Image (cartoon, grey):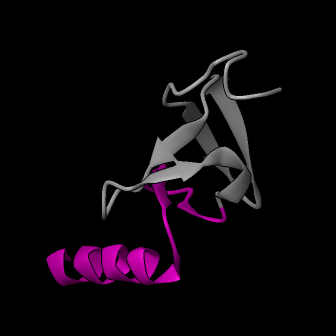
Amino acid sequence: MNRFEGPGGREAHIRYLDGDFQVVTPGAFVRCAVTGRSIPLDELKYWSVARQEPYVDAAASLKRENETLARD
């Protein structure tokens, strides 16, 4: 599928599972919960099942984890 077919540049809605994710609403990308940067679905590697949030990289994931721990 090329970028002019299908869901195009829309944001996907995802259900994050252990080691996998399920596309609820098709789209080309999701937004990092920490940075707001878009993450193409084929590059999505980091997310939280508990918070149902995607992260652009390990550093963003760690930052969110530290923020969550600081609030507790």
Residue 33, quarter of picture? bottom left
For residue 30, side relative to residue 8 (left or right): left
Q: In which quarter of the image is the N terminus?
A: top right
Furthest residue toward left: 71
Q: In which quarter of the image is the C terminus?
A: bottom left
Residue 36, quarter of picture? bottom left
Residue 13 location, x and y as percent? 53, 30
| Residue numbers of the magenta segment | 45-72
Q: Is residue 66 magenta?
A: yes
> Is the residue 57 above or below the residue 20 in the image?
below
- Between 7 and 62, the one nearer to me in the picture: 7
Residue beneath the point at 49% across and 30% down: 11
Residue 57 location, x and y as percent? 52, 74
- Between 9 and 27, the one nearer to me in the picture: 9
> Is the residue 30 above or below the residue 37 in the image?
above
- Between 69 and 60, the one nearer to me in the picture: 60
Residue beneath the point at 73% across and 51% down: 42
> Is the residue 8 above or below the residue 56 in the image?
above
